[in-house]
Image (cartoon, helix red, strand yellow):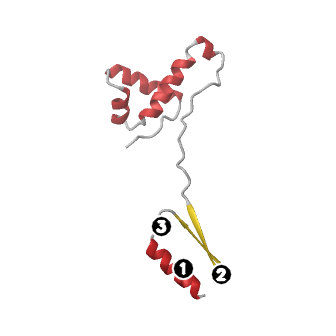
Amino acid sequence: MAGRKVRDRTEAEAALAAMAATGTTLARWARAHGLDGRSLNLWRLNLERRGRSHVSSYPDLRLVELVAESAPTPTYRVHAGSFTVEVADPFDEDVLRRLLRVVSSC
């Protein structure tokens, strides 16, 4: 399970220094200290890039973590008279049958 994200530059610098002193991998050190390894690694990259001359001329430049969203769940609409029933996939066919029976009896 991933740990918590690194809060700020100060915490990142302290964590990276402590990790370097142990000689262990970033992932192992982060896990042992309850930090998200991806977050700490992004801070490492960000801090390294800030130290380079072509990047340091852009002090507001920073990396951000992008998280992919899952695809929308398909939905189905069934019209019965003046009623509409909408279900998301996957759905329970028995529940849908019972629901349509109730709607058709109205």
Query: In the figure, 64 relative to 22: above or below?
Result: below
Q: Outermost residue toward the top? A: 53
Give the quarter of the figure containing the N terminus: top left
Q: Which mark is residue 100?
A: 1
User: Looking at the image, is mark 2 or mark 1 earlier in the sequence?
Assistant: 2
Examine the image and state in which quarter residue 104 appears: bottom right
**Which tag is nearer the camera, tag 3 or tag 2?**
2
Q: Which mark is residue 81?
A: 2
Residue 80: x percent and y percent?
A: 62, 79
Residue 9: x percent and y percent?
A: 53, 27
Cα gap from disc 3 to disc 2, whole angstroms:
22 Å
* Residue for point 50% across, 27% down: 43
CB-based contact (under 8 Å), mark 2 and mark 1? no
Viewer-side residue, 64 vs 11: 64
Tag 3: amino acid? Phe
SS at mark 3? Answer: loop
* Residue for point 37% across, 20% down: 20
Tag 2: amino acid? Gly
Examine the image and state in which quarter residue 15 appears: top left
Residue 32: x percent and y percent?
A: 33, 35
* Residue for point 57% across, 29% down: 63
Query: In the figure, 53 relative to 104: above or below?
Result: above
CB-based contact (under 8 Å), mark 1 and mark 3? no
Viewer-side residue, 44 vs 8: 44
Residue, disc 3: 91
